[in-house]
Amino acid sequence: MQSVFVARLFVHRSYKATTLLFTPFRRDLQPRYILKMNEAFLRYEEGSDVFDISFRYMDETMMIDRRFNFSRQITESINKFLIRVDANICKIINKKIEKKNKKRKNDDASDIATLPCDNVQTGKIMLLKDDAKIDGEMPCESFLRDSAVLKLIIFEKTFLVKRNAPHVVNISLSSSMLVGFPTYPVKFESLYTDKKRSIFNWYKNDAVNKKPSLWTHVGNGYLYIPNVSDIGCNLKLSCEPWNESDHGCSIEVESKNIVEPGPGQCPFDIRHQFTKNRLSGRSFRIMCYNLLADIYADSEFSKDVLYPYCPSYALDMDYRKQLILKEIIGFNSDIICLQEVDRTVYERDLLSSLCTLNYDGVFVTKNEISEGLATFFNQERFEKLGFQFNVMAQNTDVPRFATVWSKINNEKTKERFLKRNTTIQVTILRSKEQPSEILIVGNTHLYFKPDADHIRLLQGYYAITYVHEVAKKTLEENPECNVSVILSGDFNSVPECGIYRLMTENYVPETCEDWRSNTEEAIKDISLTQDLRMSSACGTPEYTNYTPEFSDCLDYIFYEKDKFEVEQVVPMPSKEELTLHTGLPSVVFPSDHISLCADLKLKG
């Protein structure tokens, strides 16, 4: 695997050198709108003081082909708006005429007369409503809320005015594009647009053969997976935005960088052999994954101390997120619970891409921290009934936990617990195929310090009792339904510690060693019980986290064993795969954690 990667990297560097030496062509990397000649796009939000309108004006005689954009006050008169249109267009046309006249003087030809800026008064520029001229003294706001057909007339050219048509505000491509891994717009900001209905087309140029302006169509859709023939090429994406009833002007953008060789086959590609088919009926697939947030990977300490064995480019989120997305998509999961998700990664990469595959998601950060928890679900199979979360330190008065909290006498323990921003996220999902079945899906990421088993145990107790309370309330509101609980996440706790015992045996005694993991913060005379009969869907793998300094099982998908049965556990990577590049993360593992994936079936 490594030799293949090195060989492809050598090819990539050769392409890169060729591009630098032989391609002086400068490309326009800014998004470019492609407007049709006969359409004008009007955008106005109710309550705003301004409106925007744009159109493409062409004059074949003067060789003019230009986009005009106007942002005007809604209170100004229609004539004032049209006079501004007149002035801007005449300015461009008259500049062309002046240039032509200079040339004609050299040829002893008579001058061409410039255009006067009185075309509104003479009726050459006007606005029609249902084919009748609008009174120019009326304010512009008079036509903004009107459903009548609007037309803008400019020198015998007619523009059909489209109100609030789909519009792409901003679009850009990733700085890293790898063969075999999905690429997509890393920025896609739009108005009145349904991304699923919009039309996306991908193109590559021929920069390798010194033809950077020659574009060839290579794919459709929001996501595109480059292949080997794309190496050394730039990509271009064209989007025609649509919603359920209309379309807007197309926009296109080119990539700044070229397509590079990918790392080849990753261990998760092998695991994907077990998840080729989607599930149905009472069966569903669930995935749990700590992504390794960018704020923890992109630092000198991470690169020099935590992960010195990992190439710096493989720690870069622009590289890692391509692997992460491919891994997630390939599992064909119905429910996806993620931890250490950067807000920007959630919004720009995960949600924007997965929504095109019929997923929806919820996200919550840990207070002021920019990373947090995300849960996605397949909208074809589940309906979201609700979503809630709790920052544990801010809500110690929740049922059952409050009783335990009141018995803790060690103030140092309480102080440490209250300084943590650990969060529990809960999503309530109803099965569309089995409407009487409701799932309570908990997702959490517990405190990580080695001397904090006692804090984690309290947090784990908080999490399981919190999701149980949500389940009981949901059952009260839906007495005709079966309500079942799943709790997944990075618990930062090995199977020998109290959390696993609490979940699977329902009881942790006062003598549990976790209570004494920090001598000064020792907890005395506290035992814990919880009522849900839980089990670990993936058991206790030897590793769910693997670095040279630490490796063990920290992640779990706990489920109610009297409500579900496990149909399949996707095999974990072998130790040989984990150690091939010393540890995780690596060029083929985008996180220091290993994803968990299992197929569960609701018992009949």
Image: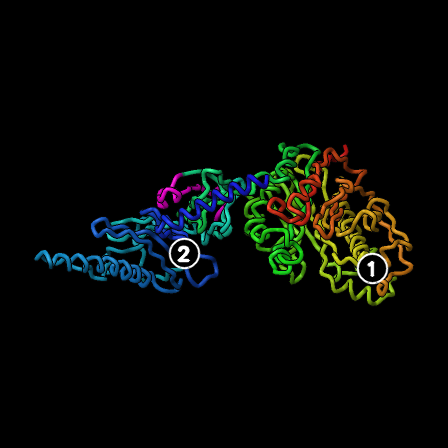
Please, what secondary structure does the residue beneath circle 1 have?
helix
Q: Quadrant of residue 542?
A: top right
Left or right: residue 363 compared with residue 519? left
Question: Residue type at mark 2?
Answer: Leu
Mark 2 lies on a secondary structure that is helix
Q: Farthest residue in the left direction?
A: 108
Can I make out residue 553 in this image?
A: yes
Which amino acid type corresponds to the residue marked 1 in the rendered image?
Answer: Ala
Task: Name the residue carrying label 2.
Answer: 144
Task: List the residue tagged with mark 1.
Answer: 402
Mark 1–mark 2 distance (CA, rounded to whole Å) = 56 Å
Residue 210 part of the magenta segment = yes
Res 395 → quadrant: bottom right
Instruction: Report the magenta residues as a range.
Output: 193-216
Earlier in the chain: of badge 1 and badge 2, it is 2
Rendered image: mark on residue 342: none
